[in-house]
Amino acid sequence: MTGATPDVAASPSEPTGTGPGRAPDARLVVENVTVEYRTRKGTVHAVTDVSLDVPRGTTLALVGESGCGKSSLGRAMLQLPRPTSGRVMVDGTDLCSLSGAALKRARKSIQMVFQDPVSSLNPRRRVRDIVAEGLEIQGIEGDGAELRRRVDAAMEAVGLDPASAGDRRPAEFSGGQCQRIALARALVLEPEVLVCDEPVSALDVSVQAQILNLLEDMKARYRLTMVFISHDLSVVHNIADRVAVMYLGTVCEVADTTALYRAPAHPYTMLLLSSAPTLGGTLADTLGETPIAATSSELPSPLNPPSGCRFRTRCPRATAICTTDRPQLVDIAPGHQVACHHPLEENR
Ligand SMILES: Nc1ncnc2c1ncn2[C@@H]1O[C@H](COP(=O)(O)OP(=O)(O)O)[C@@H](O)[C@H]1O
Ligand SMILES: [Mg+2]
């Protein structure tokens, strides 16, 4: 798929929009991003008009069921591929307006870690060469000593011993170790933004905690701005500062993590929370007061999404307006936005 490139020149001083809750010091700004795939069956509306921002040094979690567009949005942030429309700004530079060498240079500042560490690593290359890939692409080969120093530092930062691990190949490592290699490969470029797409979903539960702790360490150490994608709300609870809940290509609620878990306002968020079994007491209290059940468990097709609110076909609170009007994200409390005609007021 090749998307349209918005005809806008990057300008660091340009205001980055006036959407609800716009953070003054946002490092990553996603503006009206739409991702569509043209297939033989028709157009897949994977992401529709999503706007988000992530302040410097914070982590935004993107959560929602499988197929709701999380990976498409994450990849669009890196221009892999370019979104069909919209803008993605890193520190004021619109990546969607860049191409060729300028895009390659700008990509250095935003890196991605994928769900399946094993398949995301080239099995034939040595770990040291895999970690060095990004530097080579950026032309930072310089003298060999500098390259080696940076690769060693990145490996050490993620808990891999360069001397013993550097000359081995991915197949000799466990899933958790491979995810460390993938993280070293991303961090070696000293990115400002790191997009982690379900980075622990393919790992054993015992290893998940180690990688989550490592990501938290990296975030503090490098002052990373992170987007952490997960289908599981219980995974993002500790790592995310803010959470954006996605449903069928749209964002239905964004809030600080504590507020979202304590006082979810969108019926879909409530549904997601009630199906996350391991969240413990805080959540049980909330749900005790406002039980909610979907009227249908069937996820509509992104080939033909419902009119108006995309959640309306499963929503117990839906009324006529939900069929005709797409709800916009609006502030319901400081830093808390919801796109719903009938939010759960009783939680606040
Ligand atoms: N390359 C593609 N071509 C066609 N459809 C795609 C492609 N990638 C993803 N999709 C579809 O787009 C929708 C969103 O997918 P995805 O972004 O992978 O969601 P998630 O990461 O939340 O599971 C799904 O319906 C998926 O089948
Ligand atoms: Mg995905």
Image (cartoon, rainbow, N blue to C red):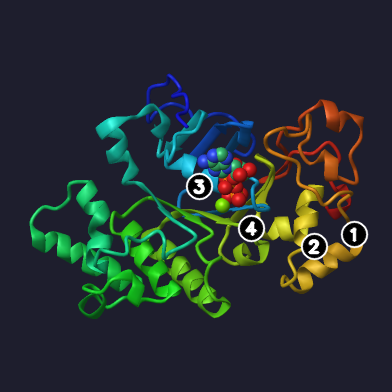
Mark 1: give few (<14), some (14-19) or many (20+) Cα within 10 Å: few
Specify the amino acid type for callout 2. Ser
Give the residue type at disc 4. His
Indicate yes or no: mark 4 CB to ligand 1 under 8 Å: yes
Q: Which mark is residue 291?
A: 1
Q: Are marks 2 and 1 in contact (CB under 8 Å)?
A: yes
Is the C-beta of the residue carrying label 3 under 8 Å from the nearest atom of ligand 1?
A: no
Above or below: residue 65 compared with residue 11? below
Q: CA distance from mark 1 to mark 4?
A: 21 Å
Counting residues from the start of the chain, the first of labels 1 and 4 encountered is: 4
Q: Quadrant of ligand 1?
A: top right
Question: Between marks 3 and 4, how big is the CA–CA gap?
Answer: 22 Å
**42 relative to 210 in the view: left or right:** right
Viewer can see residue 25: no
Cα–Cα span, label 3 and label 2: 29 Å
| Mark 2 or mark 1: whose residue is earlier in sequence | 2
The secondary structure type at the circle numbered 2 is helix
Label 4: element kind: loop
Mark 2 residue crowding within 10 angstroms, few (<14) / some (14–19) / many (20+)? some
271 to 254, vertically: above or below: below
- Circles 4 and 2 in contact, beta carbons < 8 Å: no
Q: Which residue is mark 3?
A: 55
Q: Which comes before the other along the chain, label 3 or label 4? A: 3
Which residue is disc 4 drawn over? 231
Of label 3 and label 2, which has the lower sequence position?
3
Residue that label 2 marks = 274
Residue at (76, 37) in percent of width and height: 310
Q: Is residue 137 rendered to the left or right of residue 245? A: left
Residue pictured at 31% horizontal, 46% vertical: 108
Residue 324 in view of the camera: yes
